[in-house]
């Protein structure tokens, strides 16, 4: 079972109606308060901990043939704040993976944005922004596990490994582009570092995720 964050059976969680939130809880200020860990039956869990980097608190992931993530489950108003900004860092990437196939669907760093289907899980959609090992920046493809999730490579390869990289995505525009949906809101975000399909190892760090105008 692969964590696509789009198939309800794989997730074993549901996003519930929440007040609209301007942004997820910042790791730098409140740590993991308001975030929920998501593990997957039969899978080793990636180890996460709060760490200091340049005197700023961030979320550190240590992956050893494992897969799990942390989820922020609140509605976010894309009419007001459609742009998601964050920074991330990876220690290394994987070698020899076919990332568009199930056997190679591992990424040292992922950021998910999720539209929850609620009582109709087939309506769930997920954007998955990844730091790829092989596919070039700008490449995109349907998840190997479900057509309800779409992968977008923002970074690729060892170039940049070991240093923080800043990202900025217009989430509303991306849902329109990849799913044909013009959304007023999404239902949550998640971060995940996984290395279970190929049995590898990776380290990654996540800074605050912020939704902006």
Image: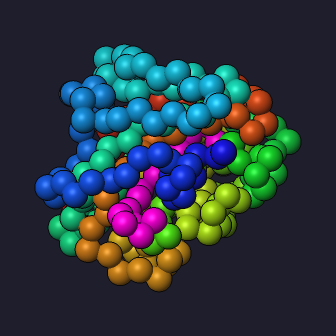
Residue at image x 32%, y 22%? 57
The image quadrant where one finds the N terminus is: top right
Q: Is residue 115 magenta?
A: yes
| 98 lies left or right of 203 | right
In front of the other: 55 or 118: 118
In front of the other: 190 or 53: 190
Q: How is the structure coloured here?
A: rainbow
Name the main secondary structure of what is drawn in magenta.
Answer: strand
Looking at the image, which residue sits at the far right?
Answer: 96
Residue at image x 78%, y 36%? 198
Q: Which residues are magenta?
A: 107-121
Q: Is residue 13 visible?
A: yes
| 71 lies left or right of 149 | left
Which x, y percent locates residue 29? 21, 27
Would you place residue 90 above or below residue 111 in this image?
A: above
Would you place residue 3 above or below residue 185 in this image?
A: above
């Amino acid at each position: 079972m692969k964590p696509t964050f789009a198939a309800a059976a794989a997730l074993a969680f549901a996003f519930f109606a929440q007040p609209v939130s301007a942004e997820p809880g910042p790791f730098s200020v409140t740590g993991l308060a308001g975030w929920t860990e998501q593990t997957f039956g039969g899978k080793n869990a990636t180890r996460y901990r709060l760490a200091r980097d340049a005197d700023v608190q961030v979320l550190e992931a240590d992956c050893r043939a494992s897969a799990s993530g942390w989820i922020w489950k609140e509605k976010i108003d894309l009419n007001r704040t459609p742009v998601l900004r964050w920074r991330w860092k990876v220690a290394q990437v994987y070698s020899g993976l076919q990332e568009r196939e199930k056997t190679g669907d591992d990424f040292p760093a992922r950021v998910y944005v999720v539209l929850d289907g609620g009582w109709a899980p087939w309506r769930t959609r997920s954007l998955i922004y990844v730091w790829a090992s092989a596919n070039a920046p700008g490449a995109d493809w349907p998840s190997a596990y479900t057509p309800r999730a779409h992968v977008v490579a923002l970074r690729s390869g060892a170039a940049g490994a070991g240093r923080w990289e800043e990202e900025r995505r217009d989430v509303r525009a991306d849902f329109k582009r990849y799913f044909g949906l013009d959304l007023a809101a999404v239902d949550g975000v998640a971060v995940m570092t996984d290395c279970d399909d190929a049995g590898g190892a990776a380290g990654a760090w996540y800074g605050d995720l912020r939704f902006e105008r």
